[in-house]
Amino acid sequence: LLKPNLINQDRDLTIIEREVVYVKMYEISKGVLIPLKYKCPIETCGHITEINFNISKNFVFHDMTSKEIKTNDVKFILKSSNYVPEEGDDPTRFYASFIREFEHKGEKFVAELDELTDWLLDDLDETNFEQFISKMIENLPWIEMKMTCECELCGHKEEYHFTELPDF
């Protein structure tokens, strides 16, 4: 069902769309409720409560927070990415897959993924490179899962917050 269509490392679905499909597939095959066991963290209690995690209510999918990031000397215009890293790929290639174009020293550039990756690794100075990576990490699409668990014995409540797709 999700086997990617490869054309020069491009896929049909963006990263976040792929995650949504995984969650929807789970909903269809197993239902929206996932039974979980929550152990109360209070030492004097430690009771295990069975709870249901609701996929359709507890997941929030976030796209990139900005379509443009700036370092000291470079302005990057971003796009959604459907790149899936392959074994042995430099992580920079993943971040480069989000670049639509960039402006450096007054000139605009558009390049293929390999050229972008090489430029980031070989030609961009260390300060701008580190700023780019840091800002990309802050800007990446992400999944948020929030759930409040309550111990049925002592009533202790605790909120769990995950920012990646758990393996159910």
Image: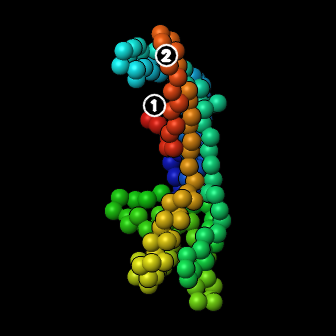
The residue that appears at 58% across and 89% down in the rendered structure is 105
Q: How far across and how far down the image is residue 43, in percent?
A: 35, 19
- Please say which color scheme the image uses: rainbow
The residue that appears at 63% across and 89% down in the rendered structure is 106
155 relative to 162, above or below: above
The image quadrant where one finds the C terminus is top left
Q: Which residue is mark 2?
A: 151
Q: Residue furthest left?
A: 88
The residue that appears at 51% across and 44% down in the rendered structure is 163
Q: Report whether 161 appears left or right of 43.
A: right
Who is closer to the viewer here, 70 or 85? 70
- The residue tagged with tag 2: helix, strand or loop? loop
Q: Residues within 10 Å of mark 2 (few under 14, many from 20)?
A: many
Q: How far across and how far down the image is residue 115, in percent?
A: 48, 79
Q: Residue furthest front?
A: 44
Q: Earlier in the sequence, mark 1 or mark 2?
A: 2
Q: Report whether 90 appears left or right of 35.
A: left
Task: Residue type at mark 2: give it.
Answer: Cys
- The residue tagged with tag 1: helix, strand or loop? loop
The residue that appears at 51% across and 27% down in the rendered structure is 158
Separation (CA) of disc 1 from disc 2: 21 Å
Who is closer to the viewer here, 74 or 101? 74
121 relative to 65, above or below: below
Q: Which residue is mark 1?
A: 168
Q: How far across and how far down the image is residue 165, in percent?
A: 50, 40
